[in-house]
Amino acid sequence: GAGVSQSPRYKVAKRGQDVALRCDPISGHVSLFWYQQALGQGPEFLTYFQNEAQLDKSGLPSDRFFAERPEGSVSTLKIQRTQQEDSAVYLCASSFPFFSRTDTGELFFGEGSRLTVL
Amino acid sequence: DAKTTQPTSMDCAEGRAANLPCNHSTISGNEYVYWYRQIHSQGPQYIIHGLKNNETNEMASLIITEDRKSSTLILPHATLRDTAVYYCIAGGYGNKLVFGAGTILRVKS
C-alpha cells in the first residue's frame, strides 16, 4: 500500500476484554515500531521488530501487552484484560533497513488506532 | 538516547518564518537530530534530520550549532496548515525514537 495502514481506527472495549490492533507496514519495510500515545502526551515507545524478530520490547507496560509479526510484514498488538489506563492511541511505524543508501532513517507512521476502555 | 528540551508552545504569524528551538546538550557523537510534527488526529510526520551540518529540504531548514548542543527548525513561510506539535528527537540512526512533549506551534492569520 501507499502508506502504513492500521485497523481498527477506533475501538471501544469494556474493561477486562481482550483487543487486537493490526498494522500493515509499507511493503518491503524491514523495521516496525509500536508506540502508545496518551491524550496530550508525546508517543511512547512500546516495541520494535526487525523482520519477524522482536528485538526490543522494553516499552511494553505489562505482560498483558503482546506483539507479534510472524511473517515479517503485518504486525498485531494484543492487549489482554484491558484496563482504563490502556485508553490511548496506538501508533505503528515502519522504516527501511538502516543500510539502505536511500534511507533517511525516517519512520513512516500510520494514523493510529484509538482505544477507549470503559 | 539524549534528552531534548523544547518550549511548550509558540505562536507565529502566517507568512512569517517560524523558528523552533531545541536543546540537546547531552547528545552523543553518533546521534542524529530528528524533527517530526503531528497534526491533530494524525500520526507523526518526518520533517528533517541532521548530524552536524545544516540541512534544508522542501519543508524546512535545520540549523545545528557547532557544539551540537542545540538546534533550530525553521519553517520559512508558515501557513495555517503548519499548526501542529513539533517534536525534536536526538537518537541513533535507525533506532527507536524517544519522543518528548514537543512544542505546540500555533500559526495565526
Image: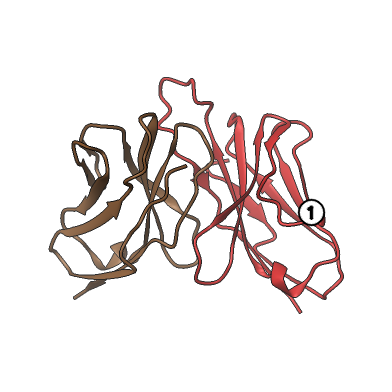
Chain colours: A red, B brown
Q: Position of residue B12 (x, y in %)?
A: 19, 69
Q: Position of residue B101 (x, y in %)?
A: 44, 62
Residue A34 vertical position relative to residue A43 in the rendered view, above or below: above
Task: Kindly indicate the quadrant of the structure image that contains residue B16.
Answer: bottom left
Number of numbered discs = 1
Q: Nearer the viewer, residue A11 or B66?
A: B66
Q: Chain of mark 1?
A: A
Direction from residue A82 to residue B1 in the image, left or right: left
Point out the residue furthest to the left here: B16
- Who's the residue at 70% across and 71% down the image? A85
- Who's the residue at 30% across and 52% down the image? B23
Q: Position of residue B59 (x, y in %)?
A: 26, 47
- Who's the residue at 54% across and 26% down the image? A97
- Who's the residue at 60% across and 34% down the image? A31
Q: Position of residue A113 (x, y in %)?
A: 64, 61
Direction from residue A9 to residue B53 in the image, left or right: left
Label 1 packing within 10 angstroms: few (<14), some (14-19), many (20+): some
Q: Amino acid at mark 1?
A: Lys
Where, quadrant-wise, is the C terminus of chain B in this rendering?
bottom left
Residue at disc 1, secondary structure: strand
Which residue is label 1 attached to?
A78
Q: Nearer the viewer, residue B76 or A54?
A: A54
